[in-house]
Image (spheres, grey):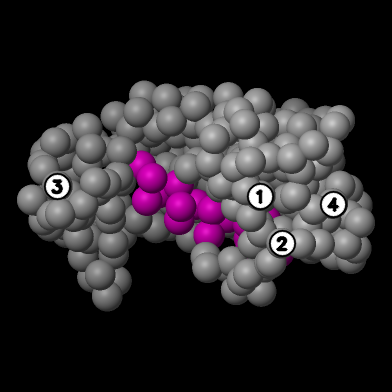
Amino acid sequence: MSSRGFVSPFHSVSVPDPEKKGRMARKIPKTSLPLLSTDLTYVIVPHARRKRFALVLKPGKKLEVRTPLLYTSSDLLTYERYIVSNQDWIRRVDEKYQKRVENSAEPLSEAFPGRDYILYLGTRYPFHIQSHITSHQAWVALEQNHFFVIRTSNADSKELRIALSTWYRNKAEEVLPPLVEKYAAIMNLSVPDLTYNCVKSRWAVCYPSRNQIRFNILILKTPPDCIEYLVVHELSHFYVSDHSKKFWMVVSSYMPDYKIRRKKLTTYRTVL
């Protein structure tokens, strides 16, 4: 690949990632990204159990470069060259994310206007909509862990659903990775790549050949013990791909009370 217009990482400045302490964010200027026509900030996410680097794009062009724990300046140059060479993929995946959010927001419409609560980690929270706010994008906050506030420029139901869907997705990205890392270490597994969706059919799906787990963001509506069970369940598929007796023996060896948690999780099927 030609390096014309490419900005070496040795001349750019790393800054702390504003969303996650201890990680570093770096910026590639738009002059190197003609297919994106915008500056692209990516985050370096090192992990002790990772052997190779991988690109993971999250909604809103949130790009992560997941790397081994130890990496060099020459590795950074490799990462950035790879990002530039894959900018068409970044653009296409980002467009797909935008369509998916719009199309999958409907299952989250329970609070607009049919019910008077928003479900999070198994708890029902009242909510209040503040409309006519001077903002181009609605946003959601759980205030003092007591109630939700949804601020929006108008009370359009589609905008509200998309805002809540985005909030669940962001929370999934906070809650699930530490749990996966915790149980991957306990189960002597490498940490898989995580992706997220919002569907009506299943809580999660494991792809051992890709070293990937895809979680349904609606799992954030269920209690923490259910979420832990789901993590162990999906990680167990790296040992046994089907749901045979051997599979459930693996699950039981790491979570003896899995039957209780599993049964509890089934009571939340209606939120899908």
Q: Do the residues labelled 3 and 1 touch (CB within 8 Å)?
A: no
Task: Report helix, strand or loop for mark 4.
Answer: helix
Residue with the mark numbered 4: 77
- Rounded to the nearest angstrom, the CA distance separating label 3 from label 1 is 32 Å
Q: Which of marks 1 and 4 is nearer the N terminus?
A: 1
* 260 to the left or right of 153: right
In what quadrant of the picture does the N terminus appear?
top right
Which region shows up in magenta?
165-182
Q: Are marks 2 and 3 in contact (CB under 8 Å)?
A: no
Percent across and percent down for residue 168 are 40, 49
Task: Report helix, strand or loop for mark 3.
Answer: loop
Task: Tell me the kind of residue under disc 1.
Answer: Ile
Depth check, mark 2 against mark 3: the one in front is 2
Q: Are marks 1 and 4 in contact (CB under 8 Å)?
A: no
Percent across and percent down for residue 146 are 23, 70
Can you tell which mark lies on residue 12?
A: 2
Task: Tell me the kind of residue under disc 4.
Answer: Leu
